[in-house]
Image (cartoon, rainbow, N blue to C red):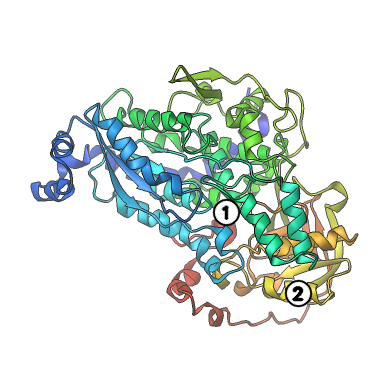
Amino acid sequence: MTHSVVLDVTQRLIDRSREARSEYLARIDAQTKVGKGRAGLSCGNLAHAVAASCSSEKKSILDLTQSNVALISSYNDMLSAHQPYQDYPNQIKQLLAHYGHTAQVAGCVPAMCDGVTQGQAGMDMSLFSRDLIAQATAISLSHNVFDSTLLLGICDKIAPGQLMGALTYGHLPTAFVPAGLMATGISNDEKVDVRQKYAAGEVGKDALLDMECRAYHSPGTCTFYGTANTNQLVFEAMGLMLPGSAFVHPHSELRKALTEDAALKIASMNQGSNNFRPLSEVVTEKSLINGIIALLASGGSTNHSIHMVAVARTAGIILTWQDISDLSEVVPLLARVYPNGPADMNAFQQAGGVPALLHRLDQSDLLHRDVVPAFGEFEDQMNLPTLIQGKLEWVRCEQSQDNSVIAAPEQVFQDTGGTRVLTGNLGNAVVKVSAVQGDQRVIEAPAVVFQCQHEVEAAYQRGELNKDCIVVVTHNGPAANGMPELHKLMPILGNVQKSGFKVALVTDGRLSGASGKIPSAIHLSPEALRGGAIGLVRDGDILRLDCQSGELNNLSDTTGRQALELDTEISQQTWGRNLFSVLRQSVSSAEQGASFIV
């Protein structure tokens, strides 16, 4: 039987969401009742939709008994994770043509990479791109000539945005088609070592660039367990892609077979068929909880404390940080992948990948079994794909193949999950504790206050952070500057910690899914620009960040203080950021998903 806390949190979620979920399902039901979209189009509408198609494609699209699959692609040839998608449309079209079906690239969405824009002006637009991608996905589907949808997207904001957009067309069967993981380049220990040495001035830029190019060296997602790979793991756990498909290498024969299998299966789900399974039946309160449990058990990215809230709300589900934190109390850490351990995602896949993790969670009665994945049944999610004499087969994943990466039965790497919520007189924040050592989980120290990560870097280079301290970075929330990831801080604070000092971070900004050993209270809400108490913190205030008790407090008296007034818009007028001013004004708090559309 499913764990009592999981049941309690789920029921609380269902009760809280009842009105919003009913409204969402009513909208989807109204769209479903319209029937096959193409049937309602005029002759002129249809002619425009097939004008560029060859004669055989035109015939199939105009034949309402055949399927026309929408492809929403995030392809670009600059970014490693998305470059493999270049050939997917033709591959899918050629396969479906053998069965009389068609596929059309309904639209493409922007795919920016936080790894490229971290520390740069472009990062200020990164989080907003998620909701823009959701809108672009909905616009792509608005032609209403499709019977189902395949989402070709992977990375940080892209996959959540595509899912949010697809949920507005939740009457269509929908699934993700992953592109896979790049091969291992160098060890994570070497990456951290060189980055910290560069931050300390011990090696030059040439050494740093050489290391980075050896780490990021080929098509596929980055090998560490950051936000991109967390997307893949969580969405596979939610049943939104074929089992075991998230981390298969690009351009491999198995990857090609999985792509074709997903395309053929989704094309068979026409409305009215026995296989019909719309997205609205796949994304439910219970499947969402399964995804969050997988997130916690794997020590996934803190960005998902924002993304999962936003995705849920698009489906009429009112998820809160407290739900995530309560689940974290009973979900153990079952995976050790960098930054939670030395292994990378290739090692995770070799250990059995998501099916092995789900099998381990299911053994502990931590998953809802009465869910409906996009393909097959719940039990099928614990099967691994393989090629036997060139044919795609599925084999049962009974347990981890490497107990140092995915825990064996009765084994845990930590009794509680990787993420928890901090509350106190500074507001509500999220902390990722899975990689924080036990003696670093309670930090009480004087505050050192900054307004941007570049100021922190300059102070470190001046030798001003060589002490016990809690670095506070204000005015980096969604409304202030789009909530950029504060990428530069981790090597710097890692060096301070390595020197023997107690150090922590408190900010209304974000950190990457790669954040690890530094206790970091992030996504602090309310943010400074909207009157949050973080804006009252001054240098020397004694702060206490307690990962054990879940408390985040300023122990100093702030009575009579005025919040720092900072015109954040002045710095947002270049590099295209001025186009997003209306979004900064309307965006919700991080706690509510940092969204301007839900």
Q: Which quadrant is the C terminus positioned in?
A: bottom left
- First along the sequence among labels 2 and 1: 1
Q: Is residue 336 left or right of residue 382?
A: right
Quarter of image, res 110: bottom left
Amino acid type at mark 2: Val
Could you tell me residue 174's position as x and y percent? 38, 38
> How far across and down, in percent of the image, does residue 191 sit?
71, 52
Query: Residue 433, relative to residue 360: is it above or below?
Result: below
Give 16 or 192, whichever is nearer the viewer: 192
The numbered disc on residue 306 is 1
Q: Is residue 241 left or right of residue 325?
A: left
* Residue 598 shown left or right of residue 502 in the figure: left
> Based on the displayed image, in which of its 4 quarters is residue 525 positioned?
bottom right
Residue at mark 2 to residue at mark 1: CA–CA distance: 25 Å
Label 2: element kind? strand
**Which quarter of the rendered picture does the N terminus lie within?**
top right
Within 10 angstroms of label 2, few (less than 14), some, or many (20 or more) residues?
Answer: many
The label on residue 449 is 2
Label 1 Cα crowd, 10 Å radius (few <14 / some 14-19 / many 20+): many
Residue 315: in sight, yes or no? no
| Residue in view at x 52 percent, y 26 percent | 381
Q: Is residue 292 visible?
A: yes
- Amino acid type of disc 1? Ile
Q: Nearer the viewer, residue 236 or 551?
A: 236
Q: Position of residue 95 (x, y in %)?
A: 30, 31
Q: What element does badge 1 sit on? A: helix
